[in-house]
């Protein structure tokens, strides 16, 4: 692939699938979470951010009806939220966790999509080392959530972190 020189490609545009890493002088695929953060930075109005979160929720794969059971429910959310976790035991930073989820609220589905972009497919140790709430603060999302939604977000993060701790404990 014939990539342009860095000066001809000074920064990643929203439509570019690659980002230039100036320290190593290579192009790397942007992670989904990096793309989401960048898109939030481009959106100044809360209404635009709200619509974007809802659009992110629409990207979630549907959860089977059989998965909408109490055992998969996240406690502490005002809306109904279901979370399924799959664990592969042999990642470089501990077991690798992938997530599926759903909610009966559009905005919450979007929050789930952001959490999955941040955590799904990551090692348990990486999950435990990543502060999702700080990310939500950085992109200005938590300040616009109702207290109930903010508590629900915290409950989802705690559930994901608990799943990571459990996965590490079973490997040890």
Image (spheres, rainbow, N blue to C red):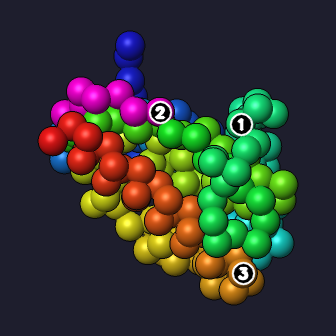
Whether residue 109 appears in magenta in the rendering, the answer is no
Taking depth in this image into account, of 100 and 169 the one nearest to the observer is 169
The label shown at residue 148 is: 3
Span of residues in magenta: 86-92
Q: For this view, does 32 lie left or right of residue 50?
A: left
Rate crowding at label 1 as few (under 14), some (14 to 19) or many (20 or more) other CA atoms within 10 Å: some
Q: CA distance from mark 1 to mark 3?
A: 24 Å
Residue 13: where, in percent of width, then height? Answer: 56, 46
Residue 48: where, in percent of width, then height? Answer: 79, 66
Cβ atoms at labels 1 and 2 below 8 Å apart = no
Provide the secondary structure element on which disc 3 rests.
helix
Instruction: Tally the marks.
Output: 3
Viewer-side label of 1, 2:
1
In the displayed structure, would residue 23 be above or below residue 92?
below
Residue at image location 81% in from the left, 33% down from the top:
65
| Residue 53 appears anywhere in the view | no
Which residue corresponds to mark 2? 86
Rate crowding at label 3 as few (under 14), some (14 to 19) or many (20 or more) other CA atoms within 10 Å: few
Residue at image location 53% in from the left, 46% down from the top:
117
| Residue 58 appears anywhere in the view | yes
Specify which label sits upstream in the sequence, 1 or 3.
1
Specify which label sits upstream in the sequence, 1 or 2.
1
Residue at image location 48% in from the left, 72% down from the top:
133
Residue at image location 40% in from the left, 33% down from the top:
87
């Amino acid at each position: 692939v014939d990539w342009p020189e860095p000066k001809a490609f000074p920064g990643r545009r929203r439509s570019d699938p690659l980002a230039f890493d100036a320290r190593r002088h290579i192009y790397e695929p942007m992670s989904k979470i990096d793309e989401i953060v960048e898109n939030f930075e481009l959106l100044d109005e809360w209404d635009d951010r709200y619509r974007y979160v809802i659009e992110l929720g629409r990207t979630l794969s549907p959860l089977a009806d059989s998965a909408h059971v109490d055992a998969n429910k996240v406690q502490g959310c005002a809306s109904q939220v279901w979370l399924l976790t799959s664990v592969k035991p042999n990642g470089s930073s501990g077991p690798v966790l992938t997530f599926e989820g759903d909610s009966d609220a559009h905005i919450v589905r979007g929050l789930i999509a952001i959490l999955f972009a941040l955590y799904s497919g990551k090692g348990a140790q990486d999950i435990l080392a990543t502060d999702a709430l700080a990310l939500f603060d950085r992109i200005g999302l938590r300040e616009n959530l109702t207290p109930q939604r903010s508590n629900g977000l915290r409950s989802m993060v705690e559930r994901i972190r608990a799943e990571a701790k459990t996965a590490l404990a079973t490997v040890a």
